[in-house]
Image (cartoon, rainbow, N blue to C red):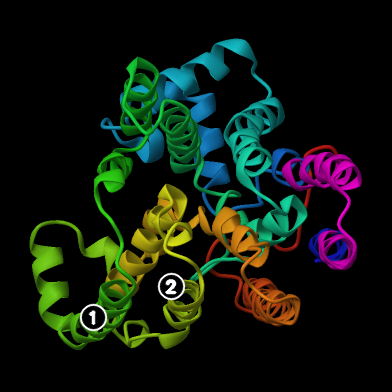
Amino acid sequence: MGIYTFLYYSILITSILLFIKSDKKIEASLFIILSVFTILIVALRDISVGTDTINYVDFFQHPERGYLWRHTTEPFYNLINLFFHNLTGEYGLFITLSSLMYLIPVSILINKYSKFKIFSLFLFITMGTASTIYFLYFSMVRQAFATAFFILALISFIDNNQKINKKVFILSLLMILTHYSSIICLIVFFLPKISIKRVWAIVVILLTIALGYSISRFYNYLMILSTTIGKGFYFRALEETQFQIMTVLPMSLIVTTILITANREFYNTLLFKVFFLGVALNNIIGMVSNADRMNLYFLIMGIIVIPQYVKLKDLSWFYKVGIFLICISYFSYKYFKVLNYMLVEGTGNVIVPYESYLF
């Protein structure tokens, strides 16, 4: 776990120092260095790092088989895979180039919108529900590409005064044709028409938590139905389906705190609305296997929203310190808990021990 520990402390210490004394020029330079390091850990991983990495390498080497021997792999990912297959026969180069293509848009997102870039990077590696956002990128190649297209489409949408143009349309189409689950992201382009009202938004958070809890109580019926329609894979084993409050409470508390203390303009920004949508969705479907992957499209916006909130001028300095320390403390606990779980149990999106195809 040495490389993950080094990455964590490098970003943590830099975040704390820049929070104490902000310097935009120094932060910009350090952001480039640390984001490159963050990306390269994923890009230089070996075939054994990340549960699905070996499956994607197999598909890369044998594109005629389909991913996991399926004949229904999304068409645009088929084209991406075929491009890499024709470009090189080296699986290491495939892992590196594909990782760069789907992680660089995350850095673009942070660089363009974050008011505290290093803290955004810290949240990127530590924030999550079941796993962390960063750790998911070691495995879910198709969805990582779809998320990259979504990020680029969202940036284009915002740049075009939150209106759909040809660029947004094409990027959204590529997103869907790379991973069908990303069709859920289309709802984001209708969010500007919705105005968030503080009280009702808090009520929604509470109701979605209650709904998620209720759904978990009726697991047996859902399992029968999902198995009948061939979707039983998406439900965890019975003993794992109890409502896990810690998969919903931290994010819900963050959103609720923002709603209570931030001004109306802040919680009606598009990025906050996207993050809010992800939290509400997570509250409802947190019991579903791979729900953290489905919510990734929306929850990733938290790496922008939370640092923006910490930098709000309306908040007192002491309050900002408190929020900053609470976020660092909880997500640090989350980061190492996930790592230790994978180390001890050897299950989930296994990324420890880390190995690189270079050595």
Q: Main secondary structure of the magenta part?
A: helix
Q: Earlier in the sequence, mark 2 or mark 1?
A: 1
Residue at the spot x=44%, y=34% of the render?
158
User: Of the residues shown, which amino acid type is indicated by label 2?
Assistant: Leu
Look at the image and say whether residue 305 sits in the magenta stretch. no
**Mark 1 surroundings within 10 Å by alpha-carbon count, few (fewer than 14), some (14 through 19), many (20 or more):** some
User: Of the residues shown, which amino acid type is indicated by label 1?
Assistant: Leu
Q: Measured along the vertical axis of the image, is residue 335 above or below residue 148?
A: below
Q: Measured along the vertical axis of the image, is residue 78 above or below residue 252?
A: above
**Residue bounds of the magenta highlight:** 11-39
Q: Residue 138 bears which disc, if any?
A: none
Task: Tell me the quarter of the picture where residue 240 sits.
Answer: bottom left
Q: Which residue is mark 2?
A: 259
Q: Secondary structure at mark 1?
A: helix
Total marks placed: 2
Q: Which residue is mark 1?
A: 207
Of residues 93 and 4, which is closer to you in this image?
4
Q: Position of residue 73 (x, y in %)?
A: 32, 32
Q: Position of residue 192 (x, y in %)?
A: 31, 45
Q: Measured along the vertical axis of the image, is residue 62 above or below residue 251?
A: above
For discs 2 and 1, the disc positioned in front in the rendered view: 2
Task: Tell me the quarter of the picture where residue 233 sits.
Answer: bottom left
